[in-house]
Amino acid sequence: MQERRFGFAIDPRYSRVLRVFGVRPGRAWIGIDGQRLRVRFGLFRLETELTNVESAGVTGPYRSALRAIGPHFSLKDRGISFCTNTERGVCVLFREPVRGPETAGLVRHPGLTVTPVDPAGFARELLAARDAADR
């Protein structure tokens, strides 16, 4: 299966701050192929097998741009977020926590939040690809 890429829905109000992290069109996307989920968020990357995806659901709106925009790591639940707007995103939970983009990679993340252009479409395609990979 050829990789299907979803762009991030970048709110123009936050484009300057996102550029600090290398986030701009062409350097920020979410990819799904027959085997893997891959995320490129400017300088940051995350990757896991599709069979490791437990669930995916649309979330938002997010209350605080300060806590939503850019790459974020939650101390509370160890989740990682790559967000470009405060309206809607997708929360992906993993069966086994994944290595994040931190320098040492010591933290394993049980979940990921991303803000693709079409959150519902991305969630549907991710779960369909996961189900096909599980067979």
Image (cartoon, grey):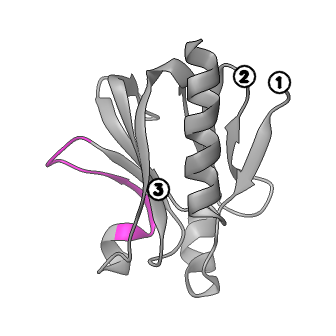
State the image coordinates of residue 23 (x, y, percent, origin top left). Answer: 65, 60
The residue pinned by badge 2 equals: 34
State the image coordinates of residue 91 (x, y, percent, origin top left). Answer: 40, 51
- Tally the numbered discs: 3
State the image coordinates of residue 81 (x, y, percent, origin top left). Answer: 41, 53
Quarter assignment of residue 97: top left
Which residue lies at the image location 30% right of the left edge and 44% below the top edge? Answer: 79
Residue 19 or 99: which is nearer the viewer? 99
State the image coordinates of residue 21 (x, y, percent, origin top left). Answer: 57, 58
Mark 3: which amino acid?
A: Val
The residue pinned by badge 3 equals: 90
Boundaries of the magenta span: 68-78
Kindly indicate whether the residue at mark 2 contacts the one at mark 1 (C-beta within 8 angstroms). yes
Label annotation for residue 1: 1
Give the vertical position of 95 relative to 100 (above or below): above
Q: Secondary structure at mark 2?
A: loop
Mark 1 or mark 2: whose residue is earlier in sequence: 1
Which residue lies at the image location 38% right of the left edge and 69% below the top edge? Answer: 68
| The magenta stretch spans residue 49 | no
